[in-house]
Each structure stands twice: as structure tokens, then as C-alpha cells.
Image (spheres, helix red, strand yellow):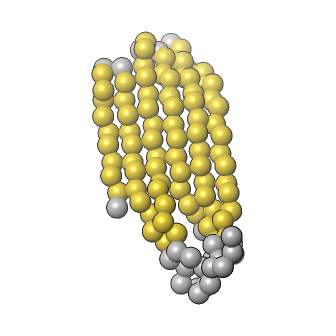
């Protein structure tokens, strides 16, 4: 199931959002539980001036590890500021991003 939204809230604010419910089965490992979880990818931009852009973003997804029967939960958060010089010829970008990759092994009977 996937829902998406792209909106220009004002002339200076944009939001782009995708939210989904992910269901994954591990067919190669009978001892593993299936995965149910929320995935998202959200980005919001605010342009207070023509040459300035503030951006906030967040995302969560899963990816397959090298082992059978588990998954990696990837979570990302970030803030950035971009300033354009001489129109759009040059820009300066200040960005902070945090990414977490958490390996989950989902075997039945484990706590």
C-alpha cells in the first residue's frame, strides 16, 4: 500500500511525501518471521528568499542484508540550507544528515 502527496502549501513552501506499508516474507528461511512496517520518504522545502532554500527530510526503509532471514532498518534525518550566488551560477550548501542502519534478525522463538 502506497500513499503520496506533493503539495505547494504557499509560494515559498513545498512538501513531497511518500508513505507506504511494507510487507516482506522470508521464503528461504522457515524460522524467520515476516516483516510488517511503515516506510516513508518526506521532504519539506522553505524558500524565504529567491536565493535561499531551507530543507528538512526524513526517510525510513528496509533493505536486504547479506544474510538470509533478516533485514536492515534504515532511518535517515537531515536539515540543509542552500544559498545561491549570482542568480543560480554558484551555490553554497550547508547540510547535516544522520543515517542509522539497524540489523534485525527475525527468528521465531527469540526474544
Does residue 93 appear left or right of residue 56 in this picture?
A: right
Q: Residue at x 50, y 28 (%)?
A: 55
Q: Residue at x 47, y 15 (%)?
A: 51
Picture coordinates of residue 108 (x, y %)? 63, 79
Compared to residue 92, the image places residue 58 above or below, namely: below
Q: How many marks?
A: 0
Picture coordinates of residue 62 (x, y %)? 56, 61
Q: Please state, as top left, top right, bottom left or bottom right, where the N terminus lies in the image.
A: bottom left
Compared to residue 71, the image places residue 39 above or below, namely: above
Q: Is residue 4 visible?
A: yes
Picture coordinates of residue 56 (x, y %)? 51, 31
Q: Residue at x 67, y 54 (%)?
A: 101
Compared to residue 32, the image places residue 40 above or below, namely: above
Q: Residue at x 30, y 26 (%)?
A: 9
Compared to residue 93, the image places residue 3 above or below, namely: below
Instruction: Quadrant for residue 109, please give it.
Output: bottom right
Instruction: Quadrant for residue 7, please give it.
Output: top left
**Of residues 63 and 22, which is closer to you in this image?**
22
Does residue 15 appear left or right of residue 87 in this picture?
A: left
Picture coordinates of residue 14 (x, y %)? 37, 29
Q: Is residue 65 visible?
A: no
**Of residues 21 and 94, which is closer to you in this image?**
21
Q: Please state, as top left, top right, bottom left or bottom right, where the C terminus lies in the image.
A: bottom right
Amino acid at each position: 500500500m502506497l500513499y503520496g502527496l506533493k503539495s505547494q502549501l504557499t509560494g515559498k513552501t513545498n512538501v513531497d511525501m511518500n508513505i507506504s506499508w511494507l510487507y516482506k516474507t522470508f521464503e528461504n528461511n522457515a524460522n524467520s518471521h515476516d516483516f510488517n512496517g511503515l516506510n516513508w520518504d518526506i521532504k519539506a522545502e522553505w524558500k524565504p528568499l529567491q536565493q535561499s532554500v531551507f530543507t528538512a527530510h526524513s526517510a525510513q526503509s528496509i533493505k536486504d542484508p547479506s544474510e538470509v532471514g533478516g533485514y536492515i532498518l534504515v532511518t535517515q534525518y537531515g536539515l540543509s540550507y542552500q544559498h545561491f550566488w549570482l542568480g543560480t551560477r554558484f551555490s553554497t550548501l550547508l547540510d547535516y544528515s544522520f543515517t542509522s542502519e539497524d540489523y534485525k534478525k527475525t527468528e521465531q522463538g527469540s526474544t
